[in-house]
Image (cartoon, helix red, strand yellow):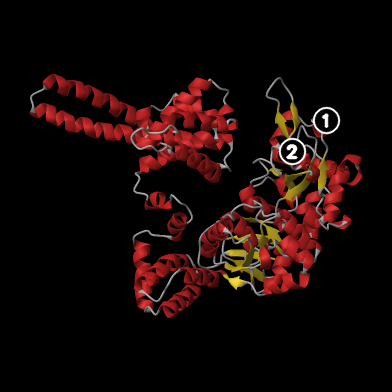
């Protein structure tokens, strides 16, 4: 029997497809709305008897393997790899020279997991790490289940192991396990002398690591308490939920996903028997992550620190979850404890706290009502301003109607007035995302009113990309003149960014690596005291920080080639806008010149207009 046939014989196609879409009985078969097309009437059918599926709206169909290929966008071999663990089938190791790039990286990462785990369990050097994990209450079985490891304080041990297995340096670097030497040739281990927490994808394949500094070396560590794997072909953190591979069955059984912030919170929860717990790993929940959770349950409870950062994380989760018709609750932990500490001290209390989680809309109502005096008209208007946009995101019409009625009752305002306001806001384009960005940032009024032109926004995006991917700064500088940047602040910033680049005559990546140096340069230029005002002229410094954060927030997931495509597209758009505006100016000036009888000047302008027209046509 071929391995593909063995996998199919051990799996029920209905169980696999149910992990992706909502199947409903249709006689002896199952039906669903097509995952490939938008439709109101189900056209997707599954035959449990024949173990096949077909989508009549798209014409696609096949067996369980082709379904995974279609849904995950992977090759046949990669689909086998995804399904093999579910079927209890062990795939033969591939020749590294013949394996696909993705499979190579998966194999490399699995070897690294085994290497680190063996070191933790057996190495003398790992004794402090073992002691720390024991003090955190982790058992031997938990260390094995989660394959927690330890990276020795060595520059090349893992690299040497992988080379001996036949893997090339470029593949080891691509897996995020090594860095290239700045001086000379060769590579070295990315992770050294750290406790290693493997990060698995949805199917249980290790794709990355979160590496914690050894506890006895925290004070002297300069790279930070945790360092994580970079974005790779197999690891996109916006599509990974830590622990979901182990929690998904229990999430379906409990019909609830409990989302915490830290990986240790998840591991402790599972060890205590609460196996429907997963982690956002300190990042904002994305729509891709929420769609993964929704495969198993539409109900989610968030156990975040409710400080400003935690509230912002809740806000972002709501923005993404409500349009997906997900029910969101808030778990309130007493005494500021994190879930790890709470569960260890009071597991029964944790269970009761989760059961008593508050609906997120009740959370918002209580928060707003405690901060606003709703006895007067101004307070009522403020409450409506803050709560109605959140309600507008609720996709379920019955649920939306419920919360409009609740708001009407609390404020003693007619439902019709609230619905009219909701409809008006919808027509004028006001939405919760814009309002939330306003309330969560000191500079939000400036950002959210957003009277900036499209060209100014593009200029901002370009500068953020240039800071995020400094290797493309020379590419930008040689193709974009100062005139093509819109907005006075952005023009000044771009001019000085190029000055900095030329002054340093740096390597392609130096700008990103030397943020402090760049900040010092901007401080020297703009941090001096203005003799007229007596205060620092620091707008450019603030803009630098804003652009750096914007680049990390919006473009962290981009690979180099994707970033270049984005940059190129923005360059073209800015040039087109500049040329179009300049042509309109020239046309007006030509009319004035002709009225004044300045025929020579008019002729010169016509020549410039023709040249610009040709440039514009070349860009289209």
Check disc 1 and report its element: helix, strand or loop: helix
Which residue is under mark 2? 220
Query: Which residue is identified by label 1?
Result: 160
The x, y position of residue 202, in whole percent, is 70, 54
State the SS at label 2: loop
Residue drawn where x is 40% and y is 42% of the image: 457
Q: How far apart are marks 1 and 2 (CA)?
A: 28 Å
- In this rendering, the answer to whether 15 lies above or below 533 is below
Verify CB contact (< 8 Å) between mark 1 and mark 2: no
Q: Residue at x 65, y 69 (%)?
A: 30
Residue 39 or residue 285, whichever sits in front: 285
In the picture, measured across the screen, residue 387 lies left or right of residue 184, that is: left
Q: Position of residue 571 (x, y in %)?
A: 42, 33
Q: In the image, what residue occupies the spot 57% across and 57% down?
A: 313
Q: Nearer the N terminus, badge 1 or badge 2?
A: 1
For the C terminus, the quadrant is top left
Percent across and percent down for residue 282 are 64, 52
């Amino acid at each position: 029997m071929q391995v593909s046939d063995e996998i199919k014989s051990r799996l029920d196609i209905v169980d696999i497809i149910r992990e992706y879409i909502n199947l409903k009985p249709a006689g002896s078969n199952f039906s669903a709305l097509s995952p490939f097309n938008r439709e109101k009437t189900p056209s997707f059918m599954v035959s449990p008897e024949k173990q096949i599926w077909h989508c009549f709206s798209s014409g696609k169909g096949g067996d369980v393997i082709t379904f995974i290929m279609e849904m995950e966008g992977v090759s046949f071999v990669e689909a086998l790899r995804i399904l093999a663990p579910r079927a209890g089938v062990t795939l033969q190791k591939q020749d590294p020279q013949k394996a696909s790039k993705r499979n190579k990286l998966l194999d490399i990462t699995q070897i690294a997991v085994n290497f680190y785990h063996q070191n933790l369990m057996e190495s003398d050097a790992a004794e402090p790490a073992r002691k720390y994990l024991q003090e955190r209450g982790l058992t031997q079985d938990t260390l094995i289940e989660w394959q927690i490891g330890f990276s020795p304080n060595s520059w090349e041990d893992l690299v040497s192991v992988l080379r001996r297995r036949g893997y090339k340096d470029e593949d080891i670097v691509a897996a995020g396990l090594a860095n290239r030497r700045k001086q000379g040739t060769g590579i070295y281990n990315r992770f050294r002398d750290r406790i290693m927490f493997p990060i698995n994808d949805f199917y249980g394949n290790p794709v990355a690591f979160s590496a914690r500094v050894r506890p006895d070396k925290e004070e002297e560590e300069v790279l930070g308490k945790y360092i994580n794997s970079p974005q790779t072909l197999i690891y996109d953190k916006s599509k990974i939920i830590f622990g979901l591979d182990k929690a998904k069955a229990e999430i379906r059984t409990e019909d609830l996903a409990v989302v915490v912030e830290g990986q240790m919170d998840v591991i402790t929860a599972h060890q205590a028997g609460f196996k429907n717990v997963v982690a956002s790993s300190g990042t904002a929940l994305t729509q891709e992550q929420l769609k993964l959770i929704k495969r198993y349950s539409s109900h989610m409870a968030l156990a975040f620190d409710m400080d400003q950062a935690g509230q912002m994380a809740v806000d972002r989760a709501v923005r993404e979850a409500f349009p997906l018709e997900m029910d969101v609750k808030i778990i309130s932990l007493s005494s500021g404890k994190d879930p790890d500490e709470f569960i260890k001290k009071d597991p029964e209390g944790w269970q009761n706290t989760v059961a008593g989680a508050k609906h997120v809309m009740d959370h918002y109502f209580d928060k707003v009502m405690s901060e606003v005096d709703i006895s007067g008209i101004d307070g009522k208007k403020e409450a409506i301003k803050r709560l109605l946009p959140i309600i507008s995101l609720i996709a379920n019409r019955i649920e939306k109607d419920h919360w409009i009625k609740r708001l009407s009752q609390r404020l003693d305002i007619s439902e019709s007035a609230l619905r009219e306001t909701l409809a008006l806001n919808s027509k004028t384009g006001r939405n919760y995302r814009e309002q939330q960005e306003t309330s969560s940032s000191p500079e939000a009024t400036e950002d959210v009113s957003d009277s900036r032109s499209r060209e100014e926004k593009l200029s901002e995006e370009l500068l953020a990309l240039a800071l995020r991917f400094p290797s493309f700064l020379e590419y930008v500088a040689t193709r974009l003149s100062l005139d093509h940047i819109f907005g006075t602040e952005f023009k000044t910033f771009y001019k000085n960014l190029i000055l900095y680049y030329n002054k340093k005559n740096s390597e392609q990546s130096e700008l990103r690596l030397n943020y402090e140096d760049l900040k010092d340069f901007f401080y020297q230029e703009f941090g001096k005291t203005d003799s007229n005002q007596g205060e620092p002229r620091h707008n450019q410094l603030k803009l630098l920080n804003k652009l750096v954060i914007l680049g990390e927030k919006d473009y962290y997931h981009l690979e180099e080639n994707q970033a270049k495509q984005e940059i190129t597209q923005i360059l073209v758009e800015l040039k087109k806008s500049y040329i179009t505006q300049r042509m309109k100016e020239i046309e007006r000036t030509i009319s004035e010149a002709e009225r004044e009888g300045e025929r020579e000047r008019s002729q010169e302008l016509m020549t410039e207009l023709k040249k610009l027209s040709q440039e514009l046509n070349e860009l289209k």
